[in-house]
Amino acid sequence: MPLVTGDVILRHAKKNGYAVCAFNVENMEMVQAVIEAAEEKKSPVIIQTSANTVKYASMTMFYAMVRAAVENSPVPVALHLDHGDSRNLALKAIRAGYTSVMIDASKQPFEDNIRHTAEVVEICKPIGVSVESELGTVGGKPGDIEYGADGYTKVEEAIEFVERTGVTSLAVAIGTVHGVYKGEPNLDLELLQTLNSKVNVPLVLHGASGLSEQDIRHCVEFGISKINYATELRIAFSDAVKEYVTSHDNIIDPKLFTKHARETVKQVVMEKMHLCGSSDQVKQTTWWNSQ
Ligand code: G3H
Ligand code: ZN
């Protein structure tokens, strides 16, 4: 089926009390792994590529791979630009066929974040492309400053931000970080609950790799509708390649180790779908057409 918008998928998740996983993909095998897992689990899914990944292969290339993978698929899939850092990149994504974009101006002052986000919403809204933005500081990427609790999303700002920008989903900072956790994650679930009760768009959790199953369950319970996984998939893919290559001599066919890596990533993706509650949400065949 054709790609659907992120908004359609997220609104269904919010209404039905589960979270949709958004998986960062880096190559064709990861695209295939995510779609195969979604079909097997009967789960809606979001495939996303970061601003860095689309420097490695273009958005046109990723769109073509995803489009081909979903062609005969019965599950709703959205293609999302993750951590887009400019209006231009968002425009490129839209032209390439992405159905959802993130504009991440969260490192900028509040008013500038609003201005950049509203600019992207203005372009996307009339053509039905969803827009995610971030408020607060998730951090953990190279060059990010450690803000601690100072960087957590502020409730009053979140209400104002959503009203003034018209975003369709909001990434919140409640104590998660990108990449591998150095210490114990300390999530502010009370803050999440309050944000969920005051902000009327689906909330997004970044930096989910490395969180315990209990943390994920709590985040879903207290109002997260989209959960982003990147690092755990990269590790699964890379470890599988290393394992295969070191245990098989004289490999000259890359398909052998990428096939093994694809299967490994698929298993991780299926576990996450089960954990986030999105498995079996594709029971009514057309909810994504009728919203
Ligand atoms: O935007 C992508 C995510 O927030 C992924 O975070 O690498 O910690 O899984 P992660
Ligand atoms: Zn992120």
Image: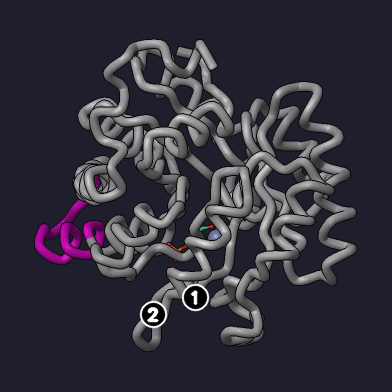
Q: Residue at x 62, y 57 (%)?
A: 52
Residue 250: say if magenta.
yes
- Is most of the magenta stretch helix, strand or loop? helix
Q: Is residue 285 left or right of residue 79?
A: left
Q: Residue at x 60, y 78 (%)?
A: 142
Query: Of helix, strand and loop, which one carries label 1?
Result: loop
**The N terminus: image quadrant:** top left
Q: How many discs mark residues in the rendered view?
A: 2
Q: Is residue 179 visible?
A: yes
Residue for point 19% across, 46% down? 267
Look at 67% across and 59% down and name the residue there. Answer: 134
Task: Residue 289 in the image: state x and y as whole percent.
Answer: 50, 12
Name the side, left or right, on which 119 lies relative to 17. Answer: right
Mark 2 vs ligand 1: CB under 8 Å? no
Mark 2 — residue?
185
Residue placed most toward the observer, 17 or 271: 17
Q: CA distance from mark 1 to mark 2?
A: 7 Å
| First along the sequence among labels 1 and 2 | 1
- Image x and y of residue 204, in percent: 53, 53
Q: In the drawing, what numbered circle is on residue 49? A: none
**Dots 1 and 2: beta carbons under 8 Å?**
yes
Q: Residues within 10 Å of mark 1 (few under 14, many from 20)?
A: many
Q: Which residues are magenta?
A: 240-254
Q: Work out whether 13 lies above or below 240.
A: above
